Image (cartoon, rainbow, N blue to C red):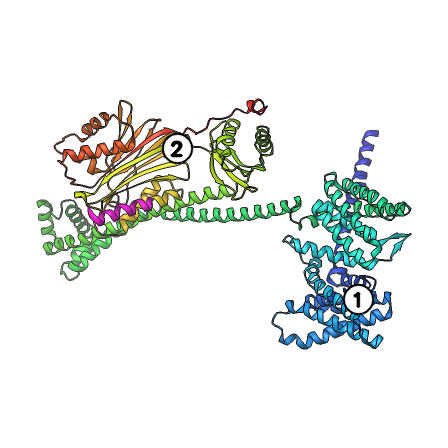
Amino acid sequence: MANSVERNVVQPLGEVNFTKPKWEFTKGLNKFQQMCETIFLKKGYLLLLIGFLLGRALILAQLTPFSLPFFAAVYFLRKEKAPIALIGLIAGAATLSIPHAVSAFGISFLFLLTYRIAKKWLTNEIKALPFFVFFTIIAGKLLEDFIVTKQLTLFDGMMAGVEASLGFILTLIFVQSLPLLSVNKRKQSLKIEEIVCLIIMLATVMTGTIGWTVYGLSIEHIMSRYLVVLFAFVAGATVGSTVGVVTGLIFSLANITSFYHMSLLAFAGLLGGLLKDGRKIGVSAGLLIATLLIGMYGEGGGTLYKTLLETAAAIFLFIFTPQALLTKLAKHIPGTTEHVAEQQQYMRKMRDVTAQRVAQFSNVFQALSKSFSSYDKPSEWEEDEGARELDYFLSNVTEKTCQTCFKKDHCWTRNFDTTYDYMKEIMNEMEYNHGDLSPKLSREWEKHCTRSKKVTDTIQQELTFYHANQKLKKQVQESRRLVAEQLLGVSEVMGDFAKEIQRERENHHKQEDLILEALQEFGIQIEQVEIYSLEQRNVDIDMTIPYCNGHGECEKLIAPMLSDILGESIVVSSEDCSTFPNGFCHVTFRSSKAFTVESAVAHAAKDGGFLSGDSYSTMELGCGKYAIAISDGMGNGERAHVESKETLQLLQKILQSGIEEKVAIKSVNSVLSLRTTDEIFSTLDLAMIDLQNAGAEFLKIGSTPSFIKRGDKIIKIQASNLPMGIIQEFEVDVVSEQLKAGDLLIMMSDGIFEGPKHVENFDLWMKRKIMELKTEDPQAVADLIMEEVIRSRSGFIEDDMTVIVAKIKHNTPKWTSIPVHKIKKMAN
């Protein structure tokens, strides 16, 4: 009973006391943030505060170069907020003295007057703005000195020039830094110039706090140290020390007694950035250590206690700065972890959008393919279509014969079925008997019809048009089927591409550290290692190494060590060496192929001519395959040469796009069959060799057999397909064969295979000649086979001849692998 009561009480209390207040606190914090943005950013009261501080900021105890540049930048960028900024400037100047306030108002009024008058002649206002500020400050200061002292000295002119020059520079700084304080969501990162301008503006604003104290502690010292640790924590030692130097320099110009603070701030920024891995505690410790060291060498030990209290106040503000604000600031500074993550997120989003668009295109092509292929499926509509075509055919016949016959009603009204069946039977017999009718049917038709001869002649005439129409319809259906297959192939390629885009680079930090440590222990200096893929047979590693002076360290040392670490052969894929001794070399290591193909060719044109109807090509595709192709154009001469060459060029481009071999060949065939009405055909003999496992696929379209010589064994590769371009619809026979290292693959055109004279069995003759070869050099084998064929023809070349010989070899690297477990011993 007690337990049940306790449960009923504790659970609601937990919900009320923890969940709800936390949600309400977050909601209240968001409302407070929105209210601050509305008041300070949208309504412009932040400009009023900045103007107030800049209005009372001094340099060298008498120069006020900040007022007019700030007012000019606000007037140029946010014209509607210029009165608020001017009020702040005048109010800040009035805290110094009334003459300062009058001077600030007078110079601002002079700037407005001259700028409004000259504005209509300006073509580029942003470039002209600093010059207007420069001349306005010179004129205003000289006029002010003349009114006060009734004379002008060289010192007055020099001081006016210095203040005007500072105003010129400050105008450029404020124009770049003020947009950073806008309410707009800034997505791009800050440039280095923008960061420096922002720091200068913040430091100049803080100079307006000179002389302000709280319980004897200087506001300027507290805020300057807070600014330094803030940037040191966000951006590291480089930016932290830069902020310290810039802030300290500006404060030392405003108050010469604060010169030693520049050393304190710079040292604090450096130490805080170096200790940023300790989070806020580490950065705070860096500021405290810098305060102790520099404070003792600054104004002496008498003020050390006060300096430590100012540092403690800055640390207190830093510790209670919301992490969300620090993260938001870090996203805009290049080099920070947050900025890199933001960029990666943006790139990931762009990648996903691109992959999605490619996948959408793939779906579109797949839908189009289904739309075209749906016409090839038998349906009830097609069966009805056949009956309708027969009705249309007989209607055309009766329109030309029976329409004017006196027995029309007798045949088509009283005896419709009999007449229809007779004419249908006549049509079928003429179609299958090439226009002839059986005597029996002819006699029966003559008895039934008074115009039998005219009707049969008309049926025979209409059959010619009917067959032509059917042939055209069949060609259209075959074209649709080919287009559907091609669209499906494109859809598959685009789908694979979309999946490839979405593959992210995996994190391989441990492997990178292992490789870096192993190479450095061996004595090789490595600057950077980046692993993009460790997939078997698809390794991709980038390295940055110091200049090797051409000693070949990458190929001789690094690649063999990577081969042992990864358990497969690694080679140098590309190398970009530095052009000067102190530079770096960028090297890419990738998996080597298990096999290589050494190919050679021998060819000759008919009668020793220059243009051969045979074309050949050997190409290594990007997917780790090696293609060998021979195309023989029909006939000889230029036309056959063009046909065979275009066939191979089209095939090569389609294969390199990633489309499957069968679809590629059908696509080439459809182009060849549809683009011309001439009887110009070409054969194709294609071998696709996988360089990883030496598996080969042979696709032969009207081509002669190929042969594989493996020691004392001859393997014949043959398939039966008509030449390309004869028919549109055909099935490609694929013959697969597993090749081995040392095999000789011999492919040839019909001029070689059918070339020997007085030979009845070309297969036996070719096998015997290949078996008699005593060499395994591909070029020598190709030359000897062609020589044997030409000799059998008594030296005459009666047809175009092409023979390609490819030798399959193991891909043996130049340098053996270096075992990793021996690295320490070798290094010692």
Q: Quadrant of the N terminus?
A: top right
Closer to the camera, 718 or 357?
718
- Specify the amino acid type for callout 2: Leu
Of badges 2 and 1, the one in the foreground is 1
Q: Secondary structure at mark 1?
A: helix
> Who is closer to the viewer here, 587 or 381?
587
| In the displayed structure image, the side of residue 780 where residue 558 appears, left or right | right
Which residue matches tag 1?
89
Of 617 and 674, the residue lying toward us: 617
The front one of 824 and 89 is 824
Point out residue 570 in the picture as x, y percentages from the top left corner.
Answer: 48, 31
Q: Please state if 305 lies on the left or on the right of 185 as rendered.
A: right
Q: Is residue 639 magenta?
A: yes
Residue furthest front as drawn? 154
Q: Is residue 76 above or below residue 791?
A: below
Say which label, 2 or 1, has the lower sequence index: 1
Q: Which residue is mark 2?
A: 691
**Magenta span has 313?**
no
**Magenta-drawn segment:** 636-651
Q: Neighbour class for label 2 at 10 Å: few (<14), some, many (≥20)?
A: many
For the C terminus, give its image quadrant: top right
From the top left corner, tell me how far across and down residue 215 is, in percent: 91, 52
